[in-house]
Image (tube, coloured by chain):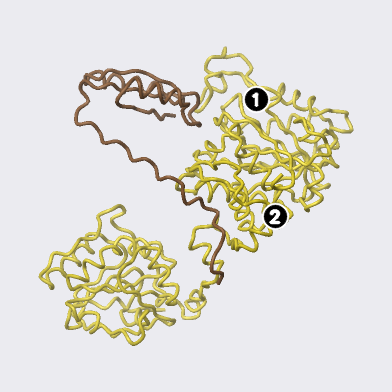
Amino acid sequence: MAADYVSPIDERVAEPEPLAPAPASLRGSRAVLLDIRKNRGAEFLDRVETLLRAEGVATARVTKEIFSKPAALTVIHDIAARGGLVVEALAD
Amino acid sequence: MSHPSPVGAGRPAPELAVRGTDPGAVTIGELAAGGCALLLFVSEECPTSAMALRRLGSLCQDWEAAGLASAAVFEDPLEVAVRVARRRGWTGRVLSQEPPYPTSRAYGLVSVPTAVLVDRAGTIVGTVTGWDHPSLQALVQKAGALLGARLTDPPAAQPRQKPGCASKAALDPELAAAMSAPAGTDDIEEMFERGWTDGLPVVPPTPDRVEAMLAGADGSTSLGPVPPALGEATLARVAACAVLAGCRPAYFPVVVAAARAALDPAFNLRGQAVTTQPAGQLVVVNGPVREAIGLHSGIGALGPGFRANLTIGRALRLLVTLTGQGVPGKLDRATLGQMGKVGFCLAEDEEASPWPPLHAERGFRPDQSVVTVIGSDAPLSVSEHRSRTPEDLAHVLGWAAASAWSTNWWPLEEPQVFVICPEHAEMFRAAGWSKQRLRRFMFEAVRKPAAELRRGETTPFVHAADPAALVPKWASPEAIVLVVAGGEAGRFSAVLGPCSGMGYEIVSREVVPVGR
């Protein structure tokens, strides 16, 4: 058996970043609702936004270019500047 | 054929006729000497056995410390047993029995997995067949009671119950012997162990083979990050994928050109690699390189039989799967997938075509060798032997695509490939139809009133349109991509499903010597 091979794998590929811990309370927080432009995602976010506001959460809406591509850096910076929480909508 | 029932509680445990990794006989008395023993009968091919090994495997060490020795008793050769136990995270002992599986027979096994608890005196305390969480939990608690210890329970994950597979001891002896033929421990199996595969055997990428593929090019040269996990496509890794796929070194410049094209951000390989739709990457090759390396564009062009076509397409897919970590079921979330995701490479039959070849349409000289990548679903064959006019033929071909992507999803924004067979192409040639005319005819012919498309999955365009307005299948004639390939006899063209929602562009790259 051959002792070694040329690997097709890049061993340096980073592990996914872990999610930040969920806040103990939503009241008084700022949430950005990210519409990824999936069909009817905006309707879903409308419902989420209503529920969040009822919990005392200030909301803002952000939209990215297309669901199948990562958000542009400007969108990510916009989210970071406007909120402490993010809700990303998947729909269809 | 009749079989005994599993040996029940209160009966003496039959002696073992097994082989372990340590020399010497393994006995029930020795196993249970610390307090009691859990025998888990399993086999390599059985998914429920795999689940049992995985779920119980990490508990063995704690159990052993408390006095419960656990042993997986495989109905497989020892080298297979050791490999499977390692892959499933089994930390207990590994035992193997050969045909005709005397230990399984002695215990009256009908299926695997079967767990048997034996006390210090060599008496069977209980037996559980298949994966049955409540029963296994009770069995472990019995062991705990015997030992006066609190043993960790099996995990209560779903499914909580799952039937097992037939024990080889319960099979016809000749069939069992045939099934037990060793899978082999050579370097082909080593590739499966490492996960360097698309599910088919691969050619191991030894340094010599990769060096031959590189043909002197610097292996550290980077073509950029490969989505979705963004592993870096060094030429050495691309060459490793080409070797794994079975490419000859002569194919490597085409593989590299395909990789360069697919890694262009405009192609949105990231979206294609992770989507739930069955997105493959079609590689179309044009120009003199086709003949130079034996790329096939004639009979059976979309099927099996031609090494260059099959391995070049496969090399690109292995790059996405391995270097990019777009592994099916992991980052690759395709609901069904399709065989084009194993690899899909087509050479255009420029010689049989009445039209400018694809690469010339895209701005290259006809004498250049060019690779073009297109996001694509599987082909749908279109039989059309009766048309006597180009209008009829174009009508049939166009309407074959009416259900592409989804029945009522009109118009399609993304490119859609039609592979026109030579006999169909000849009809258009004889009538003097250009590619532009064929595209325009199909674009005008394949239309439906918006009202008929308002059911299920449809587009905002359809919802916004007047109900009587005629909606075309494609957003523009340019969305229709025409290439010619196939055998000279038979009127079967094909339309390939599109790759929708990706916001991508078709990308072409010239085939040049690697490293230039």
* Residue B375, x across and y down, in percent: 62, 37
The foreground one among B390 and B69 is B69
Relative to residue B295, is residue B226 drawn left or right?
A: left
Please provide percent x and percent y for residue A74.
Answer: 45, 23
Q: Quadrant of residue B430?
A: top right
> Is residue B213 toward the left or the right of residue B295 in the image?
left
Q: Nearer the viewer, residue B140 or A7?
A: A7
For residue B363, the mark is none
Image coords of residue B399 (percent x, y): 68, 30
> Which residue sits at x=14%, y=68%?
B144
Q: Is residue B401 visible?
A: no
Residue B217, percent from left and from top = 68, 51
Mark 2 sits on what residue? Answer: B216
Label 1 belongs to which residue? Answer: B474
Three-letter code for the amino acid on which mark 2 is drawn:
Gly
Q: Is residue A1 above or below residue B435?
A: below
Question: Residue at 21% across / 68% down in the picture?
Answer: B63
Chain letter for the residue marked with disc 2 in the picture:
B
Q: Amino acid at mark 1?
A: Trp
Nearest the eye: B199 or B23: B23
The quadrant in which the N terminus of chain B is found is bottom left
